[in-house]
């Protein structure tokens, strides 16, 4: 028999002396123990005492997981001892985010710090020394989780390391929930709007903190925006692109929401309309992108070969929109298509990025991005594309109060400082690029489109 009865349970330092205790069969009394380190270094150890007990006093000169084999006669035993160059920093858990009072059945975010814990370390959040509420993980020295209680009372919370050695404690007052009216509401929402009209919705958010985020939703499925509360108010800009009775909700939580019905009516005959985004995808533009109040329009070409034919079906063009989306999102790493509208060779115009959100098309991105699908470095856009671009840009200018598209004004650029440019410009006017085609935008007929739109605005 040869057994270890006591050995270091935590890492030891290089050149730190430590002891290993054990017991052997008494008939080995007086025999030397034989030590083998890391399977290659051998040394003679101490004698075994008359009662079979033995003690090895040892130190290591190098760090690492050191293997020590102990032998006597035909018996042997092994152990691995972690050896470190410096002492590990002490771990420490703390609460830093705890509400002092929490109503019953209301969720709350609890968080804190976890100094010197590796990322991914599992912790335990425990209540009253018996109920495990959550098992948060450490990320960048912090931990966070969401909890709620079913019964009122003063509750003791503990955050505990998985081995139980490190912990911190705090208390939270859980109070009986009081019934309250909804805190979010609409202020004078319109009863009726025209399709494709930019709409500003607003309302109150009583007892919310500045910066709290709400959700504006249509028909219980389509997220329109995520406005933030400011001084008890909220406001969001959106565009409704489907006709009919639309259920619009502003949501603070599952228990706190307000609803209104807005009738969206079709545009007058002859009014320009783009194909809605739902024609080619069910994925909306991310609602947390920065809002846009357009200062102008930038024309582009997609610079993708083999665009759909002039007689292509909507299904073919929808597939092309998905190709463009994939390139911009999975290729460029953008949140959505960079342009707000894309004009196909058929003359149909497709809504891309939501026009109320800042784009990713000319670096400055303080205006709307309109792109002709295809490559127009030498070829010229066809008449259908030209006519649609005029109709689209006229509609956008009227929508956003742009009254002059030809007179140059001081305009910031990405590569040329401030330039005097009209409020309808080409990509190459702001960025060192060949988009959208030849100098001056001749291949996309930019000067002609600009003049035609300006004429429409004057009538």
Image (spheres, grey):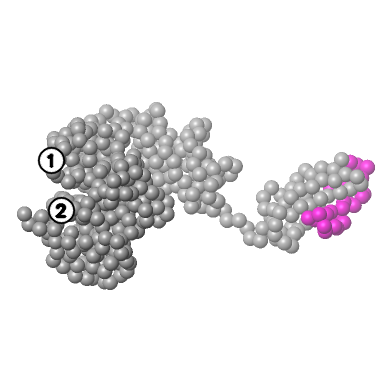
Residue 349 can be seen, yes or no: no
Residue 76 appears in the rendering: yes
Is 37 inside the magenta-drawn segment?
yes
Which is nearer the eye, 6 or 49?
A: 6
Say which of 326 and 109 sits in front.
Answer: 326
Residue at position x 74%, y 62% from top? 61
Helix, strand or loop for disc 2: helix
Dot 1: what SS?
loop
Task: For the C terminus, give its image quadrant.
Answer: bottom left
Vertical relation: 105 (above or below) 399: above
The image quadrant that residue 274 belongs to is top left
Label annotation for residue 394: 2
Looking at the image, is mark 2 or mark 1 earlier in the sequence?
A: 1
Query: Percent from the top left, x then y, of residue 201?
Result: 19, 42
- For image coordinates 30% across by 40% down, the residue present is 278
Q: Which numbered disc, 2 or 1, marks the residue closer to the eye?
A: 1
Give the magenta-colored segment's residue range. Answer: 25-54
Question: Mark 2 and mark 1: span between their CA atoms?
Answer: 16 Å
Q: Is residue 74 magenta?
A: no
Label drawn at residue 269:
1
Q: Horizontally, is 190 left or right of 153 in the view?
A: left
Q: Quadrant of the N terminus?
A: top right
Crowding near the residue tagged with mark 2, few <14, some 14–19, many ≥20 C-alpha atoms within 10 Å:
many
- Residue 242 screen position, x and y as percent: 22, 37
Q: Nearer the viewer, residue 23 or 449?
A: 449
Taking the spot 25% from the left edge, 30% from the top edge, the residue there is: 180
């Amino acid at each position: 028999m040869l057994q270890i009865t006591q050995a270091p349970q935590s890492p030891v330092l290089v050149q730190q002396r430590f002891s290993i205790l054990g017991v052997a069969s008494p008939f080995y009394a007086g025999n030397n123990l034989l030590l083998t380190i890391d399977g290659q270094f051998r040394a003679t150890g101490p004698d075994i005492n008359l009662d079979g007990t033995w003690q090895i006093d040892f130190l290591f000169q190098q760090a690492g997981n050191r293997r020590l084999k102990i032998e006597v006669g035909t018996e042997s035993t092994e152990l691995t001892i972690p050896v470190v160059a410096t002492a590990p920093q002490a771990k420490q858990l703390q609460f830093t985010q705890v509400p002092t009072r929490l109503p019953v059945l209301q969720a709350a975010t609890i968080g804190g710090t976890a100094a010197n814990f590796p990322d991914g370390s599992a912790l335990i959040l425990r209540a009253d020394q018996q109920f495990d509420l959550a098992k948060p993980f450490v990320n960048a020295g912090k931990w966070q989780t969401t909890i709620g209680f079913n019964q009122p009372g003063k509750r003791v919370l503990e955050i505990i390391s998985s081995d139980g050695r490190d912990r911190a404690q705090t208390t939270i007052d859980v109070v009986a929930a009081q019934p309250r009216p909804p805190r979010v509401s609409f202020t004078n929402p319109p009863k009726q709007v025209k399709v494709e009209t930019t709409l500003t919705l607003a309302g109150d958010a009583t007892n919310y903190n500045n910066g709290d985020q709400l959700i504006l939703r249509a028909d219980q499925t389509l997220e329109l925006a995520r406005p933030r509360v400011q001084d008890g108010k909220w406001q969001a800009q959106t565009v409704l692109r489907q006709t009919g009775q639309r259920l619009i909700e502003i949501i603070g939580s599952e228990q706190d929401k307000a609803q209104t019905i807005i009738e969206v009516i079709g545009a007058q005959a002859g009014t320009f309309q783009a194909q809605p985004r739902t024609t080619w995808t069910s994925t909306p533009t991310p609602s947390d992108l920065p809002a846009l109040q357009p200062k102008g329009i930038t024309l582009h070409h997609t610079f993708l070969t083999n665009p759909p034919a002039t007689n292509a079906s909507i299904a073919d063009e929808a597939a092309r929109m998905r190709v463009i989306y994939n390139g911009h999102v999975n290729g460029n790493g953008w949140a959505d298509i960079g342009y707000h509208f894309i004009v196909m060779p058929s003359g149909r115009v497709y809504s891309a990025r939501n026009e109320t959100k800042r784009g990713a098309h000319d670096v400055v991105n303080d205006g709307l991005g309109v792109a002709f699908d295809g490559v127009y470095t030498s070829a010229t856009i066809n008449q259908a594309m030209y006519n649609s671009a005029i109709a689209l840009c006229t509609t956008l200018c009227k929508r956003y109060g742009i009254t002059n598209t030809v007179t140059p004004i001081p305009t910031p650029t990405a590569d040329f400082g401030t330039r005097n440019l009209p409020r309808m410009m080409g990509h190459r006017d702001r960025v060192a690029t060949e988009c959208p085609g030849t100098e001056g935008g001749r291949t996309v007929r930019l000067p002609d489109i600009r003049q035609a739109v300006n004429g429409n605005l004057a009538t």
